[in-house]
Image (cartoon, helix red, strand yellow):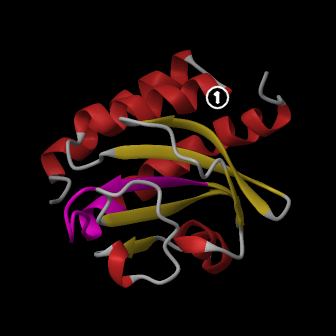
Amino acid sequence: MSVSSRATTPALLQVDAILGRLAGRAALQEVCRFLRESFRHYRWVGVYRVEGTELVLDAWDGPAATEHTRIPIERGVCGRAVRENRTVVVDDVRAAPEYLACFLETRAEVVVPIREGDRVVGEIDIDGNEVGAFDRTDGTFLEQVARRLSASVVQAAAKPAS
């Protein structure tokens, strides 16, 4: 699967529109919903923020909640994306010993850091149900989304969840 170049601009414009009317966790939640609804190979979409030595789930959209609402940065594919400050694509999570299993049907994962300047403040985490569900077009597209989400992640960190 991939994100077609024809879909990129309209999707980014929609993300901009969401961020223009919502802020913080509400914006992150709506972006997760939009991404999952718009790209069918995105079966679960979450946004985590960095809090000390952990990743904390701030927003998600998918068929079920994950048990991984807090992930130590030294663990998992999500932690690796933060530690290495780069997008990580796993074609087959069953072949990735570091993968922290959430759902039995998950077969692929893409994790993209969200940065404020050079500092990673969060990440977008997306699961897919097919081996090789994500390619470089997904990474490139999600990196553009991540640049837009920085302010909302920082704002979510400033306001504890109720």
The residue indicated by pointer 1 is 25
Residue 87 visible somewhere in the drawing: yes
Q: Is residue 86 left or right of residue 138?
A: right
The image shows residue 143 at horizontal and vertical percentages of 44, 58
Pick the front one: 41 or 38: 41
At horizontal 37% and vertical 64% (from top left) the residue drawn is 109
Pick the front one: 137 or 42: 42
The crowd level at tag 1 (other Cα within 10 Å; few <14, some 14-19, many 20+) is many
Pick the front one: 86 or 54: 54
Q: Is residue 131 left or right of residue 80?
A: left
| Vertical order, 5 against 60 (above or below) | below
Q: Which residues are magenta?
A: 123-139
At horizontal 86% and vertical 59% (from top left) the residue drawn is 52
At horizontal 48% and vertical 55% (from top left) the residue drawn is 125
Q: Is residue 128 magenta?
A: yes
Q: Is residue 88 left or right of residue 78?
A: left
